[in-house]
Image (tube, rainbow, N blue to C red):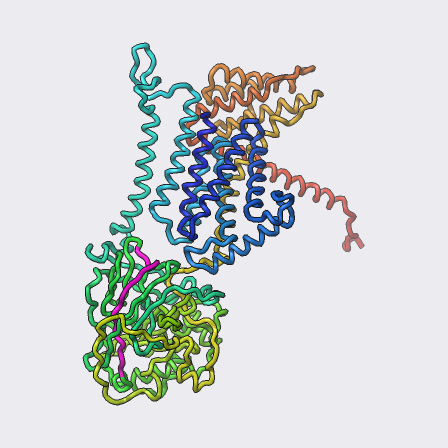
Amino acid sequence: MSGRGRLALCAFAATLLAAGSMLPLVDPAAWIVQAAFLLAIQSGVGALARRVPLPRLLIVTVQFLVTLVMLTVVFARGQALVGFLPGPEAVQRLADLLTAGADDVGRYAIPAPATDGIRLMLVGGVLLIGLAVDTLAVTFRSAAPAGLPLLALYSVAAGLSGGAGRLWFLLAASGYLILLLAEGRDRISQWGRVFGGTGRSPNGLAAGLEMSGGRPLAPVRTGRRIGALALGMALVVPTSALNGGWLAGSGSGSGKGGGGGTISAVNPLVSLQNDLNQPENRQVMSYRTNSGSPQDFYLRILALDQFTGSEWRPSRRSLQDVPKRLPNPDGLAADVAVTEIRSNVSASRSYQQTYLPLPYPATEVKIGGHWRYESAGRTLVGDRGQTTRGAQYEVSSLVVQPTADQLATAGPAPAAMRREYTQVPGSLPKVVKETADRVTKGATTDYERAVKLQNFFALDGRFSYDTSVTSGTGSAAIGRFLKDKRGFCVHFSFTMAAMARTLGIPARVAVGFTPGTGQSDGSMSVGLRDAHAWPELYFQGIGWTRFEPTPTRGSAPEYTLPDAPTGGSANPSRPQASASAAPSAAPSASDSCPPQLRRQGECGSSAAPGAAAPKDPGTPVGSIVLVVLAALLVLALLLLPLFWRVRVRARRLNSSTGRTPADATARTLAAWREITDTAWDHGIGPDDSLTPRKAAARVVRLGRLDPDEAAAVHRVAGAVEQVLYAPQPRAATGLAEDVAKVRDGVRASADRFARIRAVVAPRSAVRVIWAASEGWSALIGRWAARWRGLPRWPSRQGG
């Protein structure tokens, strides 16, 4: 196989390996087979065009047109001219599919279904990246910059999936190294047999110039070792930095051992507003429970307990192994009525995030995989890449049933808890504290203050639920929410928690799901729009207690209602012996109307509920477009000097085909300028003060050219002197061949970095800036001359 053939095959393999990082994004993954087949055709067309041979830019054009035809046949055959030509209707069909694909990306979580629009985005993207790699590595014989489109492909996959994983990075990096190795071997092979050592063979030739027993050549073995070492460091070093304690970002261990560790959680409300406006309430999990009060069965993910002024976020907490039975909840006294229930939960394969949704407070969790326990928030966190995707688990939890009297007579929280959970930033507007004092005026206990705050948002304050309001969790957003009185669960929960803290009540915000919707088979279905956020306030003797300030969402706890029992607590029910008891199929809180809203007259059909899942179930369309456009813009800017240089070289060497003296002069000067710029690109700057003969000698000396290449430079320099100084200049021939010979010689004598820079960032591209500056100066000069030629108004001073 020829050198270009090996390069084309390696470029195809590198693109396909990098495209593998996109596999986790879509289910099923059969699109990769289609992409591989079309990519093979694209590469084959390029190989045939190079054998003709065609000009380089024409090769790229042919490949692009063939790619467009293939996409038309696969995705818009019904609208194509004669079944395959991309006419106006076919182009419109492709545009419609791209728009639909962008909408699907924003609608579905990862892995998304392979709709026609998503398949077009994936297959078309792989083909465009493949065309860029083939163009750079094979057509222009420069494999190093081909890593940029490969990196763009991998980065998009990693960004959308939250990290594409070590395997996909290993495959993508291996493909790039193979491409570099193939280019290096092809370049070295042009010198004959490869030099591999300094010893001498019996015949006097350097050892390594001959193959020994079929073993790989020494430079090839060395290149493989260097590539393996670099790839290993790229995998091991970041992993050690992240998991080994350099950055101490996550805990280690499987849930069955492994010591401590910490968790620095990502704010789970990044994609909240997008999820609230999803047109389809796609199921994320289902469960069965023997709870007698399904309207209170909130599935809690984690708590946001740190208010920085710019956002609410979870604190960095210690992790430990998951105990067989979780410790008793903080602050829960023995005289508070509790009922232990059991539930079986099944998460959808499309729901993939790090935190495990649990009813609060859970007492026992039976689940496989690698999970860690965070005691302050009573949450389970995935370890070593563990997520909720497809998880099935059994949970025992408590239904805490405090009375109004128990809450009203609760003692003060411990001092350490008050210090941590009543902190508010200095940037919090004064109106927050003032409103909290005004709303709770006359209340004598923290419990009464908490109920007044809840009723202020849900009943008395005339707040309205609106998901179109700009999201925000910081001090400014809270102040704006109190003024406008419009927002969704994020605004209600965060504002109530902040106001409670100003009153000295420990508060935090929980994120999770409302109970969901009852199904005909007795199970409960939880969808994306059942996601929610609510405040939790701490009362000594009861612990962290849920409140519900968001109108038309969830259900207000019984202990916050006016008819809440005030007597002593009943005897707690005994824990159920099995989770197989018949689950309740009662309607969820989303479908039932709490008494407080029934009195307000707001019962009826409601809009999409609550907050979002902590992990982004679908990337917004705008983000996808911006990421793709940014990647393409960066790639285009990086490649502009390369394509400009290629275009200029082609124009100079084919600048004129006429036979007049002027045509001969133009050809000669263009060839000399090309030699000058080629030397400049490789580090030999031009010196316009030298004569052509001395400039040629300088290029020969600094470029370390051999005699044939030196003769080529001097021939072109002599032709320049002829056209500039001879009375009757002789027409020179073979200028293009001489230029090519000089270019090969200069490239061969330069080091690898200089060769790469000469292709990717040629120094002579600065001529574009010079030309633009000269053009601007000429334009200003013409306007100045025209202005001077305009008639002047008579001077007032002249009488």
Q: Nearer the viewer, residue 541 or 591?
A: 591
Answer whether residue 430 is visible to the viewer in this image. no
Residue lying furthest front in this view?
521
Is 421 situated above or below 225? below
Q: Quadrant of residue 297?
A: bottom left
Whole-percent x, y for residue 771 in the image: 61, 37
Whole-percent x, y for residue 381 in the image: 28, 60
**Is residue 685 part of the magenta span, yes or no?**
no
Answer whether residue 294 is visible to the viewer in this image. yes
Specify whether 684 is left or right of 383.
right
Residue found 48% across the figure and 43% down from its top? 35
Q: How many marks?
A: 0
Specify whether 346 is left or right of 128.
left
Specify whether 567 is left or right of 524.
left
Q: Nearer the viewer, residue 17 or 231?
A: 17
Whole-percent x, y for residue 476 in the image: 43, 69
Specify whether 664 is left or right of 178.
right
The magenta region covers: 386-402
Whole-percent x, y for residue 67 in the image: 55, 41
Is 656 situated above or below 418? above
Residue lying furthest top in this view?
203
Q: Nearer the viewer, residue 176 or 771?
A: 176
Locate the N terminus by quadrant: top left
Locate the C terminus by quadrant: bottom right
Residue lying furthest right in this view?
799
Q: Nearer the viewer, residue 256 or 429?
A: 256
